[in-house]
Image: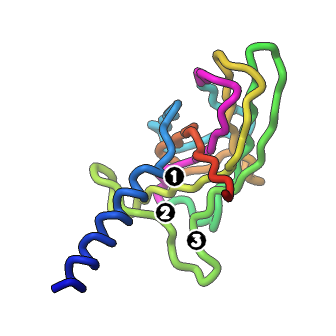
Amino acid sequence: MKRSILLVFSFYLLVSLASCSRPDTVFEGTLDFPSGEWLRFEPQQITAQIPNADDCYEIHLSAIIDTAVYHQPALPVTIKITSPAGERRTLFADLLLQARDGHSLGQPVNGHTSTSLQFNQRIREYFYFNQPGDHTVSIGQRTSRYQIQGIRQVQFTIRKAKLEYPK
């Protein structure tokens, strides 16, 4: 009896701690591609409101991709973040679509074709902004092709990171 109570309490404690450590979403912007194509030299822009420059953030990228059309193991992107003062920071990231053994890293998406999968990845952790305010975020694809097919949606998310220092 004691063992089952201890097991239930341990599970409850683990779930409580895991839910407390989830970062808070500060900004979430979505870029839709109704035609399913993304041109190389036409980056898409969104404006992100950063409330505090003292906080540490995580940057996540998510995409809905039709894997029957786009056959590459990754989606390489360039992200340029411009501050209100005009400072530009460039991030290069590869959204991984396949593991090394070739299996897909995506999850099925409701309301899309059976070959459309959603891929999620944290591309930067412990990222700092130099000042609060409206930051312009430009996201462009950097494949070797002028136009890529099968991209349905790209989502850019900024979450507040929880810094954990050893005691």
What residue span does the magenta drawing correspond to?
Answer: 47-66
Between the residue at mark 3 and the residue at mark 1, the CA separation in whole angstroms equals 16 Å
- Is there CB contact under 8 Å for labels 2 and 1? yes
Residue with the mark numbered 1: 150
- Element type where label 2 sits in the image: loop
Q: Nearer the viewer, residue 149 or 44?
A: 44
Quarter of the view holding residue 95: bottom right
Residue with the mark numbered 2: 67
Q: Amino acid at mark 3?
A: Gln
**Which residue is painted at 57% across and 38% down in the image?**
160
Q: Amino acid at mark 2?
A: Thr
Of badges 3 and 1, the one in the foreground is 3
**Which residue is painted at 38% across and 66% down in the image?**
14
Residue with the mark numbered 3: 98
Q: Residue 149, how many percent across, how many down?
A: 56, 50
- In the image: residue 126, left or right of residue 155: right
Work out which quarter of the rendered image holds the N terminus and state it.
bottom left
**Which residue is painted at 45% across and 56% down in the image?**
118
